[in-house]
Structure formats: structure tokens, C-alpha cells
Image (cartoon, rainbow, N blue to C red):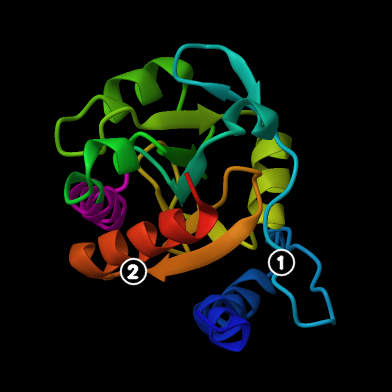
């Protein structure tokens, strides 16, 4: 996919959400989400180092995923619809691939709701049969989540008060190569067959 098209896919939905959030967040006491910097050369400056905790309680960094491509989705376990749908699309796409192809891709869910998404909550969530086999869930402190979402240019915001709140967030699946470098994005509603085809093309380009 040409880089200008990738930028449009990333920037368009994010820009709309940012404009909305600015209007909402400018009220007194509101706090705006952190944003990543933009590389003016036009290259996608997405991804980078992170330190988080997986669903087993182990501390992991981006280096722990080297050697496998990653499909990364930012969401949260209490999400009523968009997150489960996106993870189901990811699962359906991966199920269409050959076993040796599937083995080269690690699906990852990074929470945008670390307050509720504890290690124990993630452990229950990622084992759902509706989601990709071997899905890794990652959480961390508020600061760690702010850093990783900024690196991936993810927009998110808490909506509501009390314990029964929702998280507004961008819904994009990121494809990173086996060196942790950005390759492509899949927007919300991407057809599983189209995702599977793109992943197979990518694996062929990357080589055995």
C-alpha cells in the first residue's frame, strides 16, 4: 500500500476524533490525551519501545516479540462492541491462513483502560474462543499506556463517570514486521478475507 494512502487511513479518523475531543476537552478540568509527534518527511512514524505487563503477569518489551510479525489492536476488555468485533475479524483473517503462515504472526491486544484491565481480567478475556488463538493481552500503568498509545498515534478518552464508564478510542489494527517496524494498518470494518490476503502478501515480501 502506498505510504500516502497509509497516512490518509491513519490521519483521517484520528483527525476527526481529535477535533471532537478538543471541543469536549476544552471544558474546565478536562485533560487531553497525549499525542505522538509527526515526522515531517511523510514517513509513518508509528511504533517504538514499550514496557508493559502481559496476561501472565510477566513484564515484556517490544523486543520480546522480535522474530514474529505483530497484529496490534488497542482496545479494552469492557468494550461492548467495537473491540470484540475487531478481534473477531482478526481471528477470522488468521484462520484463513496456512498454519505455517499463521505461526509467523503474533496477535496483540493493548488496553487503553489499565484501571480495569488488570492481569487477571486480561487473562480471562484473551482466551475467548472468538478471538485469535494465542492472543497476548498487555496492560500497564497509566503512564506506560499513555506512552505506547502516543507511539502508535492512538486517540482515546474516558467517557462517563463511576465504574461503569466507556472508553472512546480509535479502532485500527497495526501490522508490524518481525523487527517491530510499521508496515500497514487495517481500519475498522476491514473484511477478513482482505486482511488475510494482505498478510499473506506481506509474509511473502518479508521472506521465509
Which sits earlier in the primary sequence, circle 2 or circle 1?
Answer: 1
Decide if residue 168 is in sight here. Answer: no
Please give the residue where the numbered disc 2 appears in the rendered image: 188
Does 74 lie within the magenta span? no
Say above or below: 3 vs 189.
below
Tell me the crowding category of disc 2: few under 14, some 14 to 19, or many 20 or more residues within 10 angstroms, Cα based: some
Q: Is residue 38 left or right of residue 44?
A: right
Nearer mark to the viewer, of 2 and 1: 2
Task: Please state the extent of the stretch shown in magenta in the rendering.
Answer: 79-93
What residue sits 58% from the left and 73% below the top? 21
Q: Main secondary structure of the magenta part?
A: helix
Q: Position of residue 74 (x, y in %)?
A: 47, 49
Please give the residue where the numbered disc 1 appears in the rendered image: 28
Which one is nearer the viewer's eye here, 205 or 79? 205
Say above or below: 201 vs 167.
below
Does 80 lie within the magenta span? yes
How far is the residue under mark 2 from the one under mark 1? Answer: 32 Å
What residue sits 52% from the left and 45% below the top? 112
Q: Position of residue 184 (x, y in %)?
A: 51, 66
Q: What residue occupies the far top of the structure in this picture?
A: 57
Query: Do tag 2 and tag 1 residues touch (Cβ < 8 Å)?
Result: no
Q: What residue occupies the far right of the structure in this picture?
A: 40
Decide if residue 170 is in sight here. Answer: yes
Tell me the crowding category of disc 1: few under 14, some 14 to 19, or many 20 or more residues within 10 angstroms, Cα based: few
Asked which secondary structure carries label 1, the reply is loop
Amino acid at each position: 500500500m502506498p505510504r500516502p494512502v497509509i497516512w490518509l487511513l491513519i490521519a483521517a479518523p484520528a483527525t476527526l476524533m481529535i477535533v471532537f475531543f478538543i471541543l469536549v476537552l476544552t471544558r474546565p478540568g478536562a485533560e487531553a490525551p497525549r499525542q505522538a509527534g509527526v515526522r515531517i518527511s511523510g514517513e509513518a512514524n508509528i511504533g517504538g519501545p514499550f514496557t508493559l505487563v502481559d496476561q501472565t503477569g510477566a513484564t515484556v518489551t517490544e523486543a520480546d516479540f522480535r522474530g514474529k510479525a505483530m497484529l496490534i489492536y488497542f482496545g479494552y476488555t469492557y468494550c461492548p462492541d467495537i473491540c470484540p468485533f475487531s478481534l473477531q475479524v482478526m481471528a477470522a483473517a488468521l484462520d484463513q491462513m496456512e498454519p505455517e503462515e499463521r505461526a509467523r504472526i503474533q496477535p496483540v491486544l493493548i488496553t487503553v483502560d489499565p484501571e480495569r484491565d488488570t492481569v487477571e481480567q486480561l487473562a480471562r478475556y484473551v482466551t475467548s474462543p472468538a478471538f485469535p488463538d494465542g492472543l497476548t493481552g498487555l496492560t500497564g500503568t497509566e503512564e506506560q499506556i499513555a506512552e505506547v498509545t502516543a507511539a502508535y498515534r492512538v486517540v482515546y478518552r474516558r467517557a462517563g463517570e463511576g465504574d461503569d464508564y466507556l472508553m472512546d478510542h480509535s479502532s485500527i489494527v497495526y501490522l508490524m514486521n518481525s523487527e517491530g517496524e510499521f508496515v500497514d494498518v487495517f481500519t475498522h470494518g476491514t473484511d477478513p478475507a482482505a486482511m488475510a490476503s494482505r498478510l499473506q502478501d506481506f509474509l511473502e515480501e518479508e521472506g521465509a
